[in-house]
Structures are given as structure tokens and as C-alpha cells.
Amino acid sequence: MIKVGSAVLAPGGELSAASVRRLCSQVSELVSNRVQIVIVSSGAVASGFRALGLDAPPKTIRLKQAAAAIGQQRLMARYAAGLEKSRISVAQVLLTAEDFEQRSRFLNARHTLETLLERGIVPIINENDSVSFDEIKLGDNDRLSALAAAMLRADLLVMLSSAPGVLGADARNENTNVIPSFDRVEDARRHVRADKSAVGTGGMTTKLDAAAVVTRVGIPAIIAPGSLVRAVPRILAGELIGTFFQPQSGSTDGRRRWIGLAAKAKGRVVIDAGAAKALCSRGASLLPSGITSVEGAFEQGEVVEVRDDAGKPLAKGLSAYSSAEIERIRGKKASEIVKVLGYSHCDEVIHRDDLLLAEKGAG
């Protein structure tokens, strides 16, 4: 999975033909070596806003949507032309948060992408900015690339950036001060500022957020300089470029991967210290006895967030009970559920098979 941002593709707001050619050349080389490639590409808004008579990227939602509608087809045309000589076809795939939140849409999107890859097509993913309010207001393609990588169980996420990687405390010479690797994404956060490029929606912080998502489900991530010639082939050949993030150990099945990546939890349960230790240290299920409070309204089977009594996020999971039911049985033993409710779905409020822990060491 390759993610490339607006700062790399469209510096100054103009789509750079040289940048597109550089990326297409790398894709051609990789495909010729039978590497399956998915591109998550920014650049639609940056490619289209000048056609609206604007001199700078728009700030309003309506103008961003209009710019995206203009720029997306221009962006795809450049990719198609850049890969045509290598007889590589591309496919446009526009996604929104709902494609990840709803299990059926998640599976449909994954099957479409897998079919394209099986047929030798290079999918080019972008947010559906022309119709999606939330994605433009809140989103960035760093997060989208992480969700897509986890959806497809990618072997690696490479985020091509205007920065060469995560820089150390003395960043005056950025070419020699790149920190080569981190075992935990949280350790990298103290080295970055919450900034962004003039034409992009993200920055190093959003790239670290994306790295946290994929490493949590066992996928390594790299932040590398997008201006470097043959950056991705060189990375796959073992060259130390950019900053590498070690994946957390252990595999995660598709169901729990989806649970953990659902963009919006429908509610929250707060648990005591004993339950938190059981979940995080012993891999236990969440029983009603450990729940101290319930926040939000949700139904049985919906994704909820689990937090400790200090407010630290611990996990996400599928609740076996509604919020109203949990409010009645919280603090009770599993054997008391039938007495309180008159029935029992199961002993666990969230079974361990329906739960994905948050990033280790986060918070």
C-alpha cells in the first residue's frame, strides 16, 4: 500500500507532472516484479481548485467538494497516462467512512479491491470528497490509507511525504537526522509538531495516527520522502529509508480488525481497574461485574469503546447487550443477569473474540 499526499503530488496547488511520473515509474517497476500495489492518492482538491478561479485551496465545504469533483478526473487521467506505457490499467475507488463502519460495505469494498488486484489492476483510492462532508471536514488520506491497508491485510504501508521521516531533536540537517525506526508509535509523537502542508489536510501527526492503526493489527508502516527516486522499490529491497514502525506482535482476524477500525463507536463503557487488568493482561472477556458506567445509546451488536476509570481508551468491541441493558446489569455477576433482566444473551458483555485492544502503551 502506497499513500501519497498533496504536498508531494501538487506542491503549491498545481499537480506536478514530474511527481506523478516518478510515482508511476515506481509502480511500473514493482508490478513488473509481481508486487501488488494499491495507491491511496491525495491531490484531487489541489488539482481542481484553480479551475474554480481560486488562487489558493478553498476553505469552505462547498468549494472543496466542487474542487474535488473537478480535480479527481484530472488526477486519474494523469495516473492512467503514466502507467499506460507499461500496459498497466488503473481503477478509481472512492470511499467514505461508511464503507468502513458498516460491516457489509466493508466486505464489499474489500472484495472489489481484491478482484482488481487479482486481475492485475492498480486500484487508486481516494476519499469521496465531492459528496462527503465529514471526510473533508475531519479526514485525511493518511487515515484512509491505514484503514484500507488493514482492510486488505497489506504487507506494508508506505506513506510518501514531503518530510524525509520522523526527525530527531536537532532537525537542522534533516537528511542526516531521520530517526530510522520505532518499536512503538507513541514514542515518535514527542518528536513531531502538529502542523500540515499548505495544500494538504494532514501532517506528521496524522501519519503517526495512521501508523498506530496499522501496526496495531500487525502491519508495518514507513514514512519516507516522496521526492526520492525509486523510494518504494529501494525500501522493498531492504534499503533503510525514512522511518520504520514495528508492527505489534500477533495476528488479528478480519472480524476483530473491522471492530477495531470502525470509525465511530456508538457508545462507551467505563470499567474498573480489575476488569482493565483482565482485558489487557489476560485477554479476558468483559463481564458486567467490571463495568462502572455506560455512556451513549447503542443497541445489541453495535461497536462500543471500552475505557478505564481514568478515561484511557482500552479497546473496542461488539456489545452483546444494549446500553439500556448494560445500565441495569453493570456491577452485577454474570449469574445475576437473568434475575435482573429476565433473560440472558450470554455471560459476557463483550466476548474476547469480539474485542480488539488499543495500541499498547497509548494514552
Image (cartoon, rainbow, N blue to C red):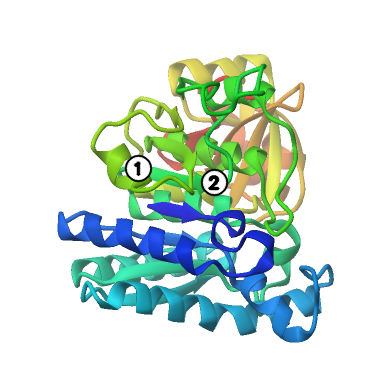
Against 339, residue 261 (above or below) is: below
* Mark 2: amino acid: Ser
Against 48, residue 120 (above or below) is: above
Q: Residues within 10 Å of mark 2 (few under 14, many from 20)?
A: many
Q: Residue at x 35, y 49 (%)?
A: 254
Q: Nearer the viewer, mark 2 or mark 1?
A: 2
* Mark 1: amino acid: Leu
Q: Residue at x 63, y 56 (%)?
A: 140
Q: Position of residue 136 (x, y in %)?
A: 71, 65
Instruction: Tell me how far mark 2 sits from mark 1, CA to CA.
Output: 16 Å
Residue contact between numbered discs 2 and 1, judged by CB atoms under 8 Å: no
Is residue 347 something that shows in the picture? no
* Chain-order first, disc 2 or disc 1: 1
* Depth check, front residue: 41 or 302: 41
Q: Position of residue 25 (x, y in %)?
A: 31, 61
Location of the C terminus (image quadrant): top right
Q: Residue at x 36, y 73 (%)?
A: 82
Q: Residues within 10 Å of mark 1 (few under 14, many from 20)?
A: some
Q: Answer left or right for 62 relative to 9.
A: right
Callout 2 secondary element = strand
Q: Answer left or right for 284 relative to 341.
A: left
- Mark seen at residue 161: 2
Q: Quadrant of residue 199?
A: bottom right
Callout 1 secondary element = loop
Q: Position of residue 226 (x, y in %)?
A: 48, 48
Is residue 320 something that shows in the picture? yes
Name of the residue lying farthest toward the right: 60
Against 21, residue 313 (above or below) is: above
Q: Position of residue 106 (x, y in %)?
A: 44, 64
Q: Quadrant of residue 49?
A: bottom right
The residue to which callout 1 is attached is 156
